[in-house]
Amino acid sequence: MKRKGLQRSLFFAVFWILILAVTLMTATYAWFTVSAVTNVEPAERAVSRGDMNLLISAGREGPFEKECTLQPDQNAGELQPVSTADLEHFYEAAAQNGRGIVSLYRRAEGQIPVVHGTLYLRSQYRECDVYLKKTGLDFGADGQMLAAMRLGLKITAQNETKTLIFRLDALGSTAGAQAAVTVPTSGTVVSSVENSGRASFVQDPSEDISDYMAVEEETDDAEPKAGRKKLCTLGVDETAAVEFWLYLEGCDENCINAVQKRDAGLQLSFAGVPADTEDMD
């Protein structure tokens, strides 16, 4: 049965924060000496039209609206490369050998050099699947930064908790990004570190961010459709916590000295598609 005004409607929620990164010092030891100042400035943007059932808030209790200004609880004064396999444990390099391969690591303690915060999404009127919305995503235009950075999301809904790490290469031109191997095995990240500083590596869990985007038509009034993979499904009036991290993945081959003196940005955008819409797969 169709519900008037809702069956063909697509609903958006967005938050926008801009991060300007400017390097303070030059590096002497490959990736782990990169340093950047990070400032957060909110901006407003109208992103919804018509009926809307995906709303956003900076706090669990609301207010839930079309957009929100987010204040990260951790906004590192300096962005420095770290490595993680699960967004819970972060590691940084402690030493490297004469071939430029990092030989010792340590666990990142205290204020980990990432941007971290939490936002909340709520579905109204009907159940919906949540995707990223490409036209609202912005992480800056610098190819070296896009190639080296990762976006992490931990989504906690009523019936599921999902941890996702995204590569951002698809959001810009990264073909010219410089690369150098700094880990023993390419395509891996640090999963744990012994007391001696010796690290264990696992396959890089990051995914292509484009796989989680809603399919958008070229016309402004067209309704995006279900993408290949959804972030989560929300029931009517259900609220999900979306914890986010923006960081430099130190084991990425593009995360080397060349990433210094670059600008980066952060703007997240979400789209809700009625849950009874079939996925592309």
Image (cartoon, grey):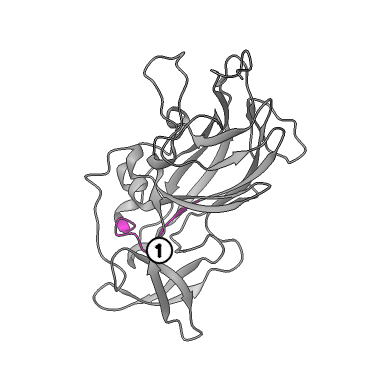
**Residue 17 shows in this picture:** no
Above/below status of 108 relative to 165 = below
In terms of depth relative to the viewer, which is nearer, 238 or 46? Answer: 238
Q: How many marks?
A: 1
Q: Range of the magenta residues?
A: 246-257
In terms of depth relative to the viewer, which is nearer, 146 or 55? Answer: 55
Q: What is the quadrant of residue 174 in the picture?
A: top left
**In magenta stretch: residue 32:** no
Q: What is the quadrant of residue 190 in the picture?
A: bottom left
Amino acid residing under circle 1: Thr
Instruction: Locate the N terminus by quadrant.
Output: top right
Above/below status of 97 relative to 235 = below
For the stretch drawn in magenta, the main secondary structure is loop
Density class for disc 1 (Cα within 10 Å; few <14, some 14-19, many ≥20) is some
Q: Position of residue 220 (x, y in %)?
A: 44, 14
Above/below status of 92 relative to 120 = below
Residue at image point 67% right, 36% down: 235
**Residue 161 shows in this picture:** yes
**In-image side of 127 versus 266 (left or right):** right
**In-image side of 186 versus 79 (left or right):** left
Looking at the image, the residue that sits furthest to the front is: 1
Residue at image point 68% right, 26% down: 65
Residue at image point 39% right, 14% down: 219
Residue at disc 1, secondary structure = helix
Q: On the image, numbered disc 1 is attached to which residue?
A: 33
Residue at image point 58% right, 69% down: 109
**In magenta stretch: residue 253:** yes
Q: Position of residue 269 (x, y in %)?
A: 52, 33
Q: Position of residue 241 (x, y in %)?
A: 65, 45
Q: Position of residue 131 (x, y in %)?
A: 50, 36
Instruction: Locate the C terminus by quadrant.
Output: top left
